[in-house]
Amino acid sequence: EVQLVESGGGLVRPGGSLRLSCAASGFTFSDAWMTWVRQAPGKGLEWIGRVKSKSDGGTTDYAAPVKGRFTISRDDSRNTVYAQMNSLKTEDTAIYYCTIGNCSGGRCHWDDAFDFWGPGTMVTVSS
Amino acid sequence: QSALTQPPSASGSPGQSVAISCTGTSSDIGAYNYVSWYQQHPGKAPKLMIYEVTKRPSGVPDRFSGSKSGNTASLTVSGLQAEDEADYYCGSYTGSNNLVVFGGGTKLTVL
C-alpha cells in the first residue's frame, strides 16, 4: 500500500525558513518522480515543484511564485523527499501535500495525474 | 487567479447528471491530452478521478467520465449520489516551466 506522510509544517515569521519532509513507502521510491502541491486556506490547488528520479536525471522544476526560494530534494536511502522553503511570505500559508503520479499500463504519469497523496502539513507564515 | 477556469458551483438532484467545465488555453488543455480531475472532500487530500482526459483509475465508479473539446475539458457525474458532494478540481499539463496548472475548483452540491 502506497503511503506518503508529510511533516515539518508549523508557524514561521515572514522571511523565515522551514523544511518539509515527506516519508514514502509501498512503492519503489527511487523510481518515482516526487511532486509538491499546496492549497491555501479556502483556495484551490497549486503545483509548486517536482524532482525527477536520479535515473531520469534528478532534476527539479518549480512554479514561478516559489522559484529561487524553495528547493526540492530527495534522499533515496531514506525514501524521503524534502522541500526547503526560504524567504517565506504570508502568501505561502497553505497545506502542503506531496504526491506521486499514476502508473498503469506500463506507463507512469509522473507530471499529469497525481494518484497518491499524503494527508498534508500546514504551514502558516505570519508575524 | 487560477490558470484554468471552473465555475464556482454546480448542483444536481440524486440520480441526475451534472457536468463541470474547465477552460484553459492552447498552451495547456488545447495542447495536450493530459487533463486530470480530482475530488476533494472537506479536510481530506484530493483524490484522482480522471486522467488523460477520459481514463479512470482503478476503483473510480464509471459514473464519472471526462471529455475535451478544444481548450475546454469537462467532467460529467451521472447518477448523482450524496457522497459525490465535494469540491472538484481540474488540472492540465503545460509542458512549460510551470508544469501543471489547476482550476480554482467547483463545489458540487447534491440537492
Image: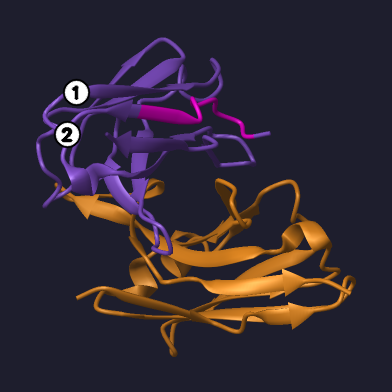
Chain colours: A orange, B purple
In the image, is B41 to the left or to the right of B82? Answer: right
Q: What residue type is labelled 1?
A: Ser
In the image, is B42 to the left or to the right of A91? Answer: left
For mark 2, name the chain. Answer: B
Please name whichever residue, B16 or B97, is drawn nearer the observer in this view of the structure: B16
Pointer 2 residue: B80
Q: Can residue A68 be seen in this view?
A: no
**Residue B29 appears at what percent x and percent y?**
46, 23
Main secondary structure of the magenta stretch: loop
Q: Residue furthest front?
A: B111
**Residue A73 appears at what percent x and percent y?**
59, 73
Q: Quadrant of residue A48?
A: bottom right
Above or below, A85 relative to B67: below
Is residue A15 rendered magenta in the image? no
In the image, is A123 to the left or to the right of A126? Answer: left
Q: Which residue lies furthest to the bottom in this view?
A: A78
Q: Residues within 10 Å of mark 1 (few under 14, many from 20)?
A: some
Marks 2 & 1, CB-CB < 8 Å contact: yes
In the image, is A116 to the left or to the right of B31? Answer: left
Q: Which residue is drawn at 58% across and 49% down?
A: A46
Kind of element beneath mark 1: loop
Q: Which residue is drawn at 58% across and 60% down?
A: A59
Q: Which residue lies furthest to the top in this view?
A: B70
**Magenta span:** B2-10
Q: In which quarter of the image is residue B72?
A: top left
Pointer 1 residue: B17
